[in-house]
Image (cartoon, grey):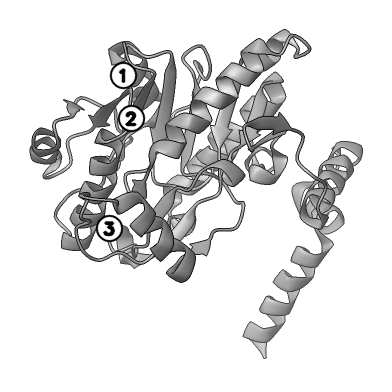
Amino acid sequence: MTLITLFSAPKPFTNPHIATIQRNAIKSWTLLPDVEVILLGEENGLAEAARELGVKHIPHVEHNASGTPLISSMFKLARENSNSDLLCIVNADMILMPDFVKAALESSSLLLNNRQQAVGLQKFVLLSQRWDLDIAQPLDFSGDWINGLRSTVHSQGELHRPAGSDFFLFPKSCYQDIPNFTIGRAGWDNWMIYKARSEGWAVIDCTPSLMIVHQNHDYSHLPGGKSHYDHPDTNENIRLAGGQANIRYTILDATHQLSGGKLAHPKMTSLRFTRKLELFLRAVFFFLPENMLENIARPKRWKKRIKKIVNRKS
């Protein structure tokens, strides 16, 4: 029995750069202690990559009408085929290091052993900000590759803003009613945070305690090479999430932060204060249409949108 089951639905391995960064990511997962890996889907080259990397492959994932895997099916298959207490959905371009497993162990242990915690907080989800880095070649995982990569990230990488998350780690008892979101489109990751907050689970930001590395890529795998934010499936994800209000949740909405082996409530920053104020205003003016709520709760963003419209017309 392993501690964590990582599961993912990689893109096709037909694009050389995508194939390279996905192999880099999955290889890093296989080097983690007490972890098993499940790759889901029938994309070109996936079965061969799974055999090459020595991980489990489950091809029969349910899809939407355009052939994109459904997250509900991914969760179901991972749950049925895992022997771990903890599950983790992770994007197939993310490099993980042993501090990832350490953070999972520390968080779950601290929550379960703290008698002052409410029973509901024994259910939790871990997430963190990612580091973005340009990687174009297969990584060399020999020697002290971890410190080498860390050094490169600190000198050449960039910490991504706290929007969404590229992994969610949680006990197997959580997230048993996932809507039919499509993977690789916007909205579903924000809903994961909303769901945890609405259920009273601990949402743990592990950014100070681990480094996850996102290997930068373009969107050539999507129609027109446009970002997934512009894809029609994103609109369906938003609908399934219950509307715009439920997909505004980000890492700023974490209830806890793991730092130095301790769990604490996140320190109040200007970003977190603004976010709390936004949620308060949305709760007070819940009866207003979404566009009016946006104007009240996020006036700066609304002004930026108006400025863009004016600039386009001028």
Question: Left or right: 185 with respect to 271?
Answer: left
Quadrant placement of the C terminus: bottom right
Circles 1, 2 touching at the beta carbon (< 8 Å): yes
The answer to whether residue 310 is above or below residue 199 is below
Distance CA(mark 3)–CA(mark 1): 25 Å
Residue 221 horizontal/vertical position (percent): 27, 58
The residue closer to the viewer here, 127 or 188, is 127
Foreground tag (3 vs 1): 1
Which residue position is annotated with label 2?
Answer: 7
Distance CA(mark 3)–CA(mark 2): 21 Å
Residue at 18% x, 27% y is: 57
| Amino acid at circle 2 | Phe
Sequence-first tag of 3 and 2 = 2
| Amino acid at circle 1 | Leu
Foreground tag (3 vs 2): 2
The answer to whether residue 6 is above or below residue 176 is below
Distance CA(mark 1)–CA(mark 2): 9 Å
Q: Is residue 250 visible?
A: no
Which residue position is annotated with label 3?
Answer: 221
Crowd around label 3: few <14 · some 14–19 · many ≥20 (10 Å): some
Residue at 87% x, 55% y is: 296
Element type at marker 1?
helix
